[in-house]
Amino acid sequence: MTLSVVVGLGRSGIGAARLLKAQGSEVLVLEKAENVSCRRKSADLRQQGIDVQLGQPLEISSFEPWLDEIDQVVISPGIAWTHPTLEALRSRGVPVKGEMALAWQTLKKHPWIGITGTNGKTTVTHLLHHVLNHGGLKAPMAGNVGYSAAELALGCLEGSSPLPDWVVMEMSSYQIEAANVVAPRIGIWTTLTPDHLERHGSLDAYRAIKRGLLERSQLAILNGDDPEISRTRGGWGDTQVSWVRTGQIRSDSASDRLSLSDDGWVCEGERRLFCADALAMPGEHNRQNMLLVTAAALEAGLAPETIESALRCFDGVPHRLESLGTVQGVAVFNDSKATNYDAAAVGLQSVPNPVVLLAGGQTKQGDAQHWLQLLKERSSAVVLFGAGADELRGLIEASAFPGAVSTHRGLEEAVPHALELARQQQAASLLLSPACASFDQYSDFEARGNHFRKLIETNRST
C-alpha cells in the first residue's frame, strides 16, 4: 500500500485525504496548527482510517519519518508551489501535486469547463452551472467556489453524486500552477489584471499561469474586451480560440464568436440570438460574463432560447454585487468578493451614485489609480476598516478625494457610521467593496460578506 501525504486540514485538504483513502491509499495529513477546530477535524478523519499529525510545520523535518514510504504529496491552493520544502521534496524524487490535479485523475473521463481570470470567474462559474443545469445537463461546479474539486471527485467515485455531463471548474492561479495536467474540453478566460503578485512575482508570470490552462484546452473562450487578454490574440497553436466582446466583432477575425449589437442583442455573427437584458445583473462586466457563458453553453449543445430562459431566472451570486435591499431609502450592496482594486472599481461603476463606500482588510499589491479616480467621480464618502485602513486612507487623501474619509477597527463600527453618512448625504447606494483580502479579520470573503449581511439586518430593524 502506498503512502500519500496531504498538507493542510482545510476543505481541499480534507477532500483530498478522503478521496485518496477511497482510492485505496494509506493517507497521512500534516497540519501546522493545533487548535480546537483542527483537533475536531482530525478526530473525524481518524475515524475514517486517515492518520493526522498536528503541529507539523511545512518543513522537510516534518516529512522525514516517512520519506522512504511517501508515494506523493498533495498540497492545498494556499501553499506556494515554489515553497522551499516542496522544492526539497522534489529534489528527493517525491512527486508533489495540487488537490486539483488529484481530482483530475478521477474526473478526466468527463468533459471539463475550466474557468479562470482575475475577476469574474466566480460569477461565470455560477452562471454557467445554472444555465447548463437549466438546460437539462448534469453540470456540477467545484474548485474555487466553496466545494472542492476533490469533494466532487469523491462524490462521483462513491456514487453519491450523479456522473456529470460537464464538470464546471473554477480555477485560481494557485490551483492551475499546481495542476498542469488539467486539460479542459473548454477553457474560459474572464479578465487579467495585476493580482497575487506577492505570490507569483510579476504580471508576466501570473499571465503565463493563466494562459497555460487555456493552451491545454481544446477550445479557449476569451474576453475580447479585456486589454491584457486581447494582447494574446496570436500564437495559440492547436487550441481552437473563440472571442467574445460587448462591442462589434472584428471583421478581420473568424475567431470572433459572440458580440452585442448597438440595440442590445446577443449576436453570433449576423444571427441575433436574444436580448441582452435577459440577465438582470448590473454592470458592463456582467455583459461580458453573459457572453462567455453563452459561448460555452452553445458549445455544450444548448439552444439560444434555452440559454435565454436560464439567464432570466438567475438570482445572482452571493457577495458579488449582491443586493441587500434598502435601508432608509439607500440601496445596499454586498461586494465582499472584490478583493483587489480592479474588482472594487467594477463595483463602483455598477451601482447608482453617489456611493458611500466601505473598504478595507488586508491590502494587496496592485495599481490603485483607476479605483481612486472612480472614488472621486462616484463616491461621496469612504468608510475604512480593518488592518489596511490607515494605508488606504493615505492613498485616498493623497489623491485629493473631496469627500469624507473615516477609519474604524472593524465592520461592527464601520457599518452604522456608513449608514448614517448615507442618510445624511442622501446617497443612492451603500457599497461594501473592500478592495482587500479578508484574512486580517475573517476566514474568507464569504465570512466577511455574511457578517456584513447580519449587520445590515440588525441596523435595518433598529
Image (tube, rainbow, N blue to C red):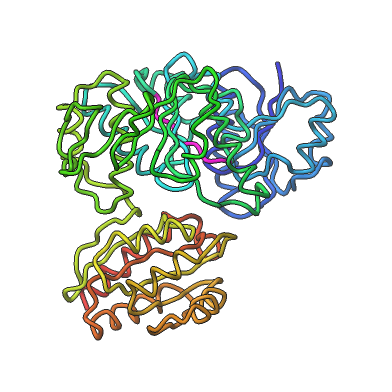
Q: Which residues are magenta?
A: 167-173
In the rendered view, would you say 341 is above or below 373? above
Percent across and percent down for residue 19 are 54, 25
What number of labels is visible? 0
- Viewed as shown, does residue 189 lie left or right of 194? left
Q: Nearer the viewer, residue 325 or 117?
A: 117
What is the quadrant of residue 163 in the picture? Answer: top left
In the rendered view, would you say 104 is above or below 372? above
In the rendered view, would you say 63 is above or below 286? above
Percent across and percent down for residue 398 are 53, 80
Percent across and percent down for residue 242 are 39, 27
Q: What residue lies at 15% left-to-right and 33% top-to-bottom?
A: 274
In the rendered view, would you say 336 is above or below 388? above
Q: What residue lies at 53% left-to-right and 25% top-to-bottom?
A: 236
Q: What residue lies at 51% left-to-right and 59% top-to-bottom?
A: 437
Q: Is residue 172 a member of the stretch shown in magenta? A: yes
